[in-house]
Amino acid sequence: MASDDYLGPRIIGRGGRGIGGWVWVAPGIGQPMPEDQSEEPSHRQHDPATNESGSDSAATVEEETAQPSEGGPPSPLPQDAPTAPGVRVNVIGPEEVEPWVDPPTRHKVIEALCFLALHRKRPVTTEELQIALSGGDDDAPETSAKSVRTYMSELRRSLGAQHVPSARGSGYRLAESVRTDWDVFQGLVARPKDVDDQLQALIDALNLVRGRHPFAGTDYAWVNSELLVSEMEVAISDAARRLAKIAMASNWNLEGIAYFAGRRAALACPYDIGLWEMAMEAAAVFDHDELVRTWREAQATLGDDATTLRDLADRLGLD
């Protein structure tokens, strides 16, 4: 199973509002995490219902909200509502673009797309693209204006002219049909919601995390200079802590969701010891096998730094 196929727990039904209501959860954690395919946990909690929604549920939730049905509890959030045709530029993990009309032959074209997608609120000048694509290396040749035009022409062919309008006097700007997973993440975590809706939105946001860190496998100078990875890691960590806090404070047994929060965030922020602590504490309530698994992964990831978790491991009964 590819990492972007993993679907976490889903709220599939609920009644009442806020802490006093009930929530029916399909945990989804019965599927192994992307890094856990070698073994299956021995126990799963809650309802045996399975999630059969499409892989683009986060985008669907970001676009649509649940509407209460008359005379009864609110309907669950839409799982399979169609989304408008568009392009998704994924950067919360290895960069990924879907769909291409014809994949470009030069990686600079993909970098140009990422830069435009992450600066989509304003036109980007040729000069800005020249600086970004030059890479910040004094020994590397400067990207010329002609090269920028060549890259943009290839991007238009590869993505579709409707998604990459021709440059105007103010510069280049992608069409509204092009979005990033970072856009969707920010929309999910920022919208004010009641407790039940926050749970679902934060789960969907964390399901967008696909790899060990944002922009995995790339080394874009502009990403580093703009501190984008740090910004994303802080936001992912904050979303995970919010989700765990809401889940553990609820009067419904949602320890599995709290565990999912810590594990999912640790994908993007693998050296955040606080997230490993959260994942271990939630796993201890959720399932002992998961606790053992989480402790082993923390040790493998953190190396010598895992000694800071030793007291917690002892308190939780780990050898």
Image (spheres, rainbow, N blue to C red):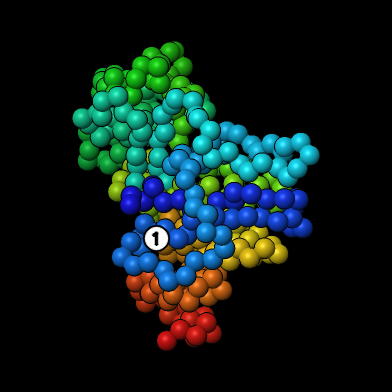
Q: Is residue 253 above or below residue 312?
A: above
Residue 41 appears left or right of 27 = left
User: Is residue 131 visible to the viewer in this orientation of the structure?
Assistant: no
Q: Which residue is at the front of the view, 208 or 61?
A: 61
User: Is residue 82 visible to the viewer in this orientation of the structure?
Assistant: yes
Query: Residue 191 occupies which quadrant of the picture?
Result: top right
Classify mark 1: helix, strand or loop.
loop
Q: Which residue is at the front of the view, 188 or 218?
A: 188
Q: Is residue 164 above or below residue 236?
A: above
Identify the residue shown where x is 33% and y is 61%. 37
Q: In x, y percent, where is residue 304?
A: 37, 77
Q: In x, y percent, where is residue 249?
A: 68, 64
Query: Residue 46 occupies which quadrant of the picture?
Result: bottom right
Identify the residue shown where x is 74% and y is 55%. 21
Q: Is residue 303 above or below residue 221?
A: below
Q: Amino acid at mark 1?
A: Pro
Q: In x, y percent, where is residue 146?
A: 26, 19
- The quarter of the picture where the C terminus appears is bottom left
Q: In x, y percent, where is residue 90?
A: 40, 40
According to the picture, the residue beneath numbered tag 1 turns out to be: 32
Identify the residue shown where x is 38% and y is 47%. 4
Q: Which class describes the residues within 10 Å of circle 1: few (<14), some (14-19), or many (20+)?
A: some
Identify the residue shown where x is 30% and y is 39%. 135
